[in-house]
Amino acid sequence: MKLTTTFCLSLFLLATTLAMAEAPFRPEVGKFPPPDKLVAYDGQLVFVDHANRRGSIRFTGGEMFHSTAPRPFALLPYGMVRYHGAPADLRDVALGTMLHGRFYLPPDPEFSAVPVVSRGGETNPAENHAILLEDEPSFCLREGKVWKLQEVDLRDNRAMVVANREAKDTGGAKEDAQQLTVDPATRIWRGRERLGLQDLIAEGVWPASGKKSLDGQAVYLGIAWKPAGTWERRVGNRRHISDIWLDEAAMQRATEHQTVAHRELIRSRWMPAYVDAIEYGKFGEATVTATLFGGMDSALYADFKQGVQAQIGASDRQLKHADGWVSHAHMAIRGPLVEVSKQDGDVPLGSSGIQIRLKVDLVLEGFRPGRVVRIRPMSWPDDSVPREEYTGGNREERFPSPDIFPKY
């Protein structure tokens, strides 16, 4: 009997160990997940609910892209968006843009802002909480890649471009060539100029009709998708070029513009952060330790200096301010930054690696460790955010229902 019990216990422990080994990774609430556990998917941005940091993506991988149903996604609290090589908000990204994404399972399925997928697939992944979404130029700039234009074939004011993506430095890896479409709506950028298809034709850079070799011209491309072909007239899952940056100067201008736009947005909405710890003092005083989220412009982090006055307010997982009937600053607590430190070594994706300690004379419920807060140096604006960007205590505002998404 004792041997049988021991054998059964051994089988149970073995089964438990195997189940744990096969269990997919789920991020822990209040902590930055390891990058080696993320899953990469690409797709087209189809729908955006920017106030709740969620939307829908038509993921690649299906036989016919036009018949692939868009699937909901949400940004993790520390999830980052990159557009034109710069920090961005979901509201900045044009619908139809093809995105490169890095995803995890929802940290807390019960409070997920999008439907939880129990059994995922290539075009409907269970990992639908993004830590990074970036458009094609952002991906290429981060990876040190460019597109090389090999040939253009122009017919009826529309062009087919043959191009391949490869390392910017000579001798790097070269990807297979692709056919990409260009039409009169494609924006072409050169230095400080914005051009169109007809401008390239007028200058003799591209032919008015027929084929021309482009000799591997290095450019940056904005990639989108537009309807092309049918079930009977199949053309494959061909991509469309929304933008062409012909030189580094043009790309840098686009990056600078987006950087400034996002910098102004964060200054008016405040810097998001995770509460790491809280040390209680006397008479309601406390010192809050928090780690600032990553992916922002360096000029924003530079404003967090030891000794400056700052305000800290409670937030939720969608980065909405906890209350804002009068203004979101009205419920925030003011105090000095007593310490600002930079983490040594590798910084997790989603984290800035910058930790601040802020002394306050009143502690809010939202200041508990693991909670999301938003912080501003007092030099930042004090303007009320719009109604959709703060909660009024309603549960559905704190945990937006996933029921708005259609079930395909």
Image (tube, rainbow, N blue to C red):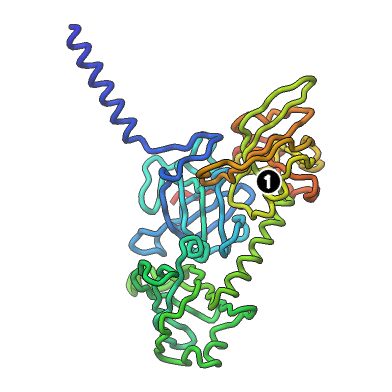
Q: Is residue 216 above or below residue 68?
A: below
Left or right of 225, for residue 297: right
Location of the N terminus (image quadrant): top left
Q: Residue furthest front?
A: 344
Residue 397 in sight from this viewpoint: no
Location of residue 55 in the rendering, given as x and y in whole percent from the top left corner: 54, 52
Q: Rate crowding at label 1 as few (under 14), some (14 to 19) or many (20 or more) other CA atoms within 10 Å.
A: many
Residue at left offset 46%, top offset 72%: 240
Residue 39 versus residue 238 in the image, above or below: above
Front-lying residue, 363 or 58: 363
Is residue 299 at least partly visible in the picture? yes
Q: Is residue 13 left or right of residue 202?
A: left
Residue 26, position as x, y percentages in the image: 44, 37
- Quarter of image, res 195: bottom right
The residue sitting at 51% across, 52% down in the picture is 132
Q: Nearer the viewer, residue 302 or 310?
A: 302
Q: Residue at x 51, y 93 (%)?
A: 204
Going by the numbered disc 1, the residue's amino acid type is: Met
**Residue at 57% from the left image edge and 77% from the top image edge:** 187
Report which residue position mark 1 lands on: 271
Q: Nearer the viewer, residue 142 or 238?
A: 142
> Could you say whether the residue bearing mark 1 is in a helix, strand or loop?
strand
Q: How many marks?
A: 1
Q: Relative to 24, does residue 92 appear above or below in the rendering?
A: below
Residue 207: percent from left, percent from top? 46, 91
Q: Position of residue 183 (x, y in %)?
A: 50, 80
